[in-house]
């Protein structure tokens, strides 16, 4: 069980950043936490697929899709791969697809929304670089906690 983000914030306060962006809970787990890994991409999920096909060891992949809802960066097959490889969750500043299937997986998934449209598969983007979403910096190697109240990030 993951500690509640509200309790964690009460304990650690200014050591944490709170993501004000309101994300939807779309996976089978609402609460999850882990070491941050990142992908920055725009309407291209090849790097997302590549990273989630590697051992996650309880990490959380933060995907900065620039807030685009024009195409999905995660679908059921990629999410199932994440489960098989031991990822705790995925946070997407963008869209996912296959909402019903994702809701049935033992994986935390937070995203802006969904779109059935597939993304490109060209491999354009960056892996494990700091990404800033709504003013909060997600630095690879630091920790992130997520639950129904929101997302906290270790500074």
Image (tube, rainbow, N blue to C red):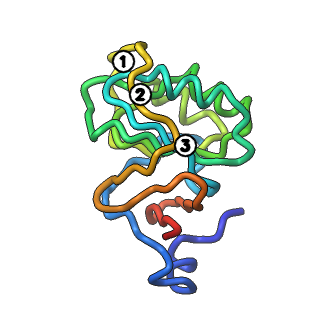
Q: Are marks 3 and 2 in contact (CB under 8 Å)?
A: no
Question: Regarding mark 2 in the picture, which secondary structure is present there?
Answer: strand
- Check residue 119 in the rendering and tell me which mark sits there, or answer none: 1
Question: Real-space Cα distance between discs 3 and 2?
Answer: 12 Å
The answer to which of 153 and 106 lies nearer the viewer is 153
Name the quadrant of the N terminus.
bottom right
Question: Real-space Cα distance between discs 2 and 1?
Answer: 6 Å
- Residue 28, compared with residue 116, is above or below; it is below
Instruction: Tell me what residue is drawn at x 35 percent, y 53 percent.
Output: 132
Q: Are marks 2 and 1 in contact (CB under 8 Å)?
A: yes
Question: Regarding mark 3 in the picture, which secondary structure is present there?
Answer: strand
Horizontal side of 89 relative to 47 (left or right) equals: right
Q: Residue 125: where, in percent of width, then height?
A: 40, 29
What residue did someone put label 3 on? Answer: 61
Question: Regarding mark 1 in the picture, which secondary structure is present there?
Answer: loop
Instruction: Tell me what residue is drawn at x 50 percent, y 79 percent.
Output: 15
- Check residue 39 in the rendering and tell me which mark sits there, or answer none: none
Earlier-in-chain disc, 3 versus 2: 3
Earlier-in-chain disc, 3 versus 1: 3
Instruction: Tell me what residue is drawn at x 40 percent, y 13 percent.
Output: 122
Question: Real-space Cα distance between discs 3 and 1?
Answer: 18 Å
The answer to which of 25 and 78 lies nearer the viewer is 78
What residue did someone put label 2 on? Answer: 73
Q: Residues within 10 Å of mark 1 (few under 14, many from 20)?
A: some
Instruction: Tell me what residue is drawn at x 52 percent, y 42 percent.
Output: 128
Q: Residues within 10 Å of mark 3 (few under 14, many from 20)?
A: many
């Amino acid at each position: 069980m993951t500690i509640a983000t509200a309790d964690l914030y009460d304990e650690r306060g200014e050591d944490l950043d709170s993501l004000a962006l309101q994300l939807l809970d779309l996976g089978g787990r609402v609460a999850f936490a882990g070491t941050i890994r990142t992908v920055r991409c725009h309407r291209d999920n090849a790097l997302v697929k590549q990273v989630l096909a590697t051992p996650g060891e309880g990490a959380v992949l933060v995907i900065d899709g620039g807030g685009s809802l024009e195409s999905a960066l995660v679908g059921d097959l990629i999410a199932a791969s994440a489960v098989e490889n031991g990822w705790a969750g995925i946070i997407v500043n963008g869209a996912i697809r296959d909402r019903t299937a994702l809701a049935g997986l033992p994986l935390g998934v937070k995203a802006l929304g969904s779109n059935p449209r597939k993304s490109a598969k060209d491999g354009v983007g960056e892996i494990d670089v700091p990404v800033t979403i709504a003013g909060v910096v997600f630095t690879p190697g630091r920790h992130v906690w997520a639950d129904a109240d929101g997302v906290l990030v270790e500074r």
